[in-house]
Amino acid sequence: MKGRNTLTQLSKLCLALTFCLPLAGCVDDSYNLDNDIDLTMGLGAKGLQLKLGSTEKIMLADILEVDDNLKTDASNLYYLVESGESESDFTINSVSAYINKSLLTPEQEILNYSTIASATGLSISSIPISAGFEYTPGEMVIAKDNIDITFENVGDEIKQITSVKPVDGTSFKLYLSLEQNGTDFAFKNVEGLKITFPDYLKLTNPTGGTITDNVFTINDMTNLNSNGLYIGEAVVSSVYLGEDGIVTNNTLTLEDASVTMSGTFTLTTLSDFAFDEGDVVTLHLTIFVGEFADDKTQISIDNVTGRFDPEVDPEISNITVMENLPDFLQDDDVTVAVANPTLKLFADMRDIPAAFNLSASLISHKDNNAIATVNLPESGAVTMAANSYNTTYFYQDAAAGPYDPEGVVSGATLAQVDNISSLISTLPDYIEVDLGDDRITIVDEDFTVEMDRTYRTSLGYDLYVPFAFENGLKIVYTDSVSDMNEDLKDYEAEGIIVTATIFNTIPLELVASAVAVDVDGNVLPGITITPATVAPAKAAEAYASEAEIIANGVNTDVELTMTLADPSDLKLLDKLRLTIAAESVQTNGENGILSSQQYLQVNDMRLKLTGNIVANFN
């Protein structure tokens, strides 16, 4: 049993002195006592008194021994701690994204019979054209088309795609070509060619030109003599959708976003041929990602910025209370009225790109019944920041702030909750931590995630119950003095009275009682022991020194009486079950603490035997 300590040893000392000292002067070991002599004696000790003296300090640290759950902090304050942890994760599933091929073609073909007839001054049905013939349209050539982007298989957890970053190497390629039939024109010069892309595209790292504000200006090219050529390329750095990125029915399409071109083109002929009525030459600018032959290309996505609502449902184990409590808190009569219980919640979100809103319900359970519920926080939610290690304190004492034996973490979120102590005023079997029903949700703001990556966070808690208490705290310490029968089976007595002055520096009223038990574990109803009460020390919220502990101490004269209805019951006594009920009874509104530096000291202890003692040495 926990707490086998100085107090128990003191009790054993008292009993040994009670029953053995009167015999020391009555038996001489030089006698040869054998079975022919009746060694049953009446020792005639009626009214005999013995002065037993004083004890050393009985430190509270020796009575309430620390363990994994009961500890003392740097100021020697006792506190209970229960801890637990869990993990939670979420994944944003990948989406399929496609970009269509754009074909920019002027509304008017760049060359037809009319323009050739005008340029050559010939109006015959078949106009001869010699190699090296050059033609430049009188006006800038203009063309327009759309770049459409489609997102398919968008998961339910994706509510809005604000922007997309394709994987490195995703590029738009520009291919300039002439469509003709029976003629042999080629590009001679390309000058002042500008391609204006939709605003939602951010292009970088151009080759073959420069990019300013989504306008790709192609470097001037001369003496090309080619009827099809790549003229440039630009990396698709990101696709910005903004408010147009709301997902509906798991799909999203950006349509009718135009791309335009304008420039001056000089054409030349590569051979001799005849330009007939009905012949045309059409200019095309093809903009594509991937392969030229594909009408649309699936692009791979590196990350997505947007608004997401994945399922986040961590399971934190119950806070086990009763089975981990020290002995002095196990009794059904225990009540805990502490001033500042504190729940320290910590979440390692250094891997999490999103902020979370968190609320919880703590529900105390005893004997399969819910006995108290506290909402954390009292209303609303607390926010845990993205990409950081978050610590949140839920605490009761607004003036004192949260209790943390290791020191309150700098930058932690603080949430004062009035009634946390109701969870433990009657000590429960366990406290349920309810985080279900969307109690943890991602903050409704944009953040960036990688597709198909599992984001994992660890959650943990420490429930601290510092023994800084208000009126109403009651703890019950139990112990026993056992194996007494071997020493007492030869004696009879009518009663014992022990008196002492007890100096108490513990701010709890102490009521000590005992029950006599025989060798079979049965209570001996004929032996009664009167309780003894020790007045509490003056309460204090902290001690500056040992002198202050002593200054708050109080002396109490106590008397403990054991009465035996039948003197022979003493022969049956084997164990005393000791109970010390310690209760805070201050009425002036002060809070007290339990410190390992507090102590009891028993002074001027005297023992008085009542009636006669009979010893049987046969």
Image: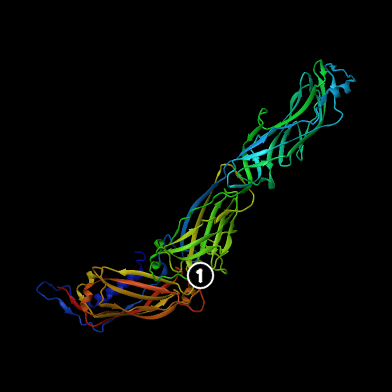
Position above or below: 512 against 300: below
Number of residues whose C-alpha sits closer than 10 Å to that of mark 1, classed few (under 14), some (14–19) or many (20 or more):
many
Q: Is residue 26 visible?
A: no
Q: The residue under label 1 is which amino acid type? A: Ala
Q: Nearer the viewer, residue 414 or 357?
A: 357
Q: Residue at x 60, y 53 (%)?
A: 355
Q: Quadrant of the N terminus?
A: bottom left
Q: Quadrant of the C terminus?
A: bottom left
Q: Is residue 174 visible?
A: yes
Q: Where is mark 1, residue-wise?
A: 339
The x and y percentages for residue 321 are 43, 62
In the visual, does 538 lie left or right of 238?
A: left
The x and y percentages for residue 172 are 70, 33
Q: In the picture, residue 26 is in which quadrant?
A: bottom left
Position above or below: 592 against 261: below
Q: Nearer the viewer, residue 2 or 219?
A: 219
Q: Residue furthest left?
A: 36
Q: Residue furthest right?
A: 121
Q: Residue at x 71, y 38 (%)?
A: 203
The x and y percentages for residue 135 are 85, 23
Q: Residue furthest bottom?
A: 47
The x and y percentages for residue 454 are 54, 44
